[in-house]
């Protein structure tokens, strides 16, 4: 699991730990996970009411793509890749994979 959340702040660390435990339980019951060459990225997105929305995505290295455990509308993700045509969502998500690699720790 990877995150860029500021874990030195105890409230952030506690929330990420709760989120990580939740995702671990979901993964144990998921039947769509690849064989093992993937990373889970956790993000806390601030909301207007001062709480955080739990956001995540999986990076599948063998298929070079991103995936989620439930339905996900990737329209916004694809639109952020302005140089990529959204006519082919599979291609756009694959390009998102390479973009996400730049954000992962090396």
Image (cartoon, rainbow, N blue to C red):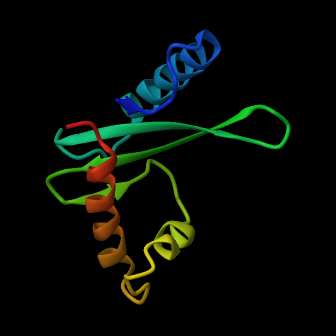
Task: Judge from the rendering whether residue 89 lies leftward or rightward of residue 39; answer left or right.
Answer: right
Task: Judge from the rendering whether residue 7 lies leftward or rightward of residue 104; answer left or right.
Answer: right
In the rendered view of the protein, which quadrant contains the C terminus? top left
| Residue 51 against residue 21 in the figure, above or below | below
Task: Judge from the rendering whether residue 47 lies leftward or rightward of residue 4; answer left or right.
Answer: right
Q: Say which quarter of the image contains residue 55.
A: top right
| Residue 82 against residue 71 in the figure, above or below | below
* Position in image of residue 7 (x %, y %): 50, 18
User: Residue at point 35% right, 68% down?
Assistant: 93
* Position in image of residue 76 (x %, y %): 56, 69
Q: Which residue in the rendered view is the most extreme toward the right? A: 49
| Residue 52 against residue 88 in the figure, above or below | above
Task: Judge from the rendering whether residue 62 lies leftward or rightward of residue 53; answer left or right.
Answer: left
User: Residue at point 30% right, 42% down?
Assistant: 104
User: Residue at point 81% right, 33% down?
Assistant: 50
* Position in image of residue 14 (x %, y %): 58, 13
* Position in image of residue 98 (x %, y %): 26, 61
In the rendered view of the protein, which quadrant contains the N terminus? top left
| Residue 42 against residue 59 in the figure, above or below | above
Q: Say which quarter of the image contains residue 11.
A: top right
Name the foreground residue: 78 vs 34: 78
User: Residue at point 34% right, 56% down?
Assistant: 66
Q: How many marks?
A: 0
């Amino acid at each position: 699991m990877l995150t860029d959340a500021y874990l030195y702040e105890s409230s952030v660390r506690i929330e990420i730990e709760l989120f990580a435990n939740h995702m671990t339980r979901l993964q144990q019951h998921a039947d769509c996970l690849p064989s093992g060459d993937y990373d889970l990225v956790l993000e806390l997105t601030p909301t207007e009411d001062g709480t955080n929305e739990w956001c995540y995505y999986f990076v599948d290295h063998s298929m070079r793509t991103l995936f989620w455990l439930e339905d996900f509308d990737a329209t916004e993700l694809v639109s952020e890749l302005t140089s990529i045509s959204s006519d082919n969502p599979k291609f756009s998500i694959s390009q998102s994979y390479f973009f996400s690699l730049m954000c992962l720790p090396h």
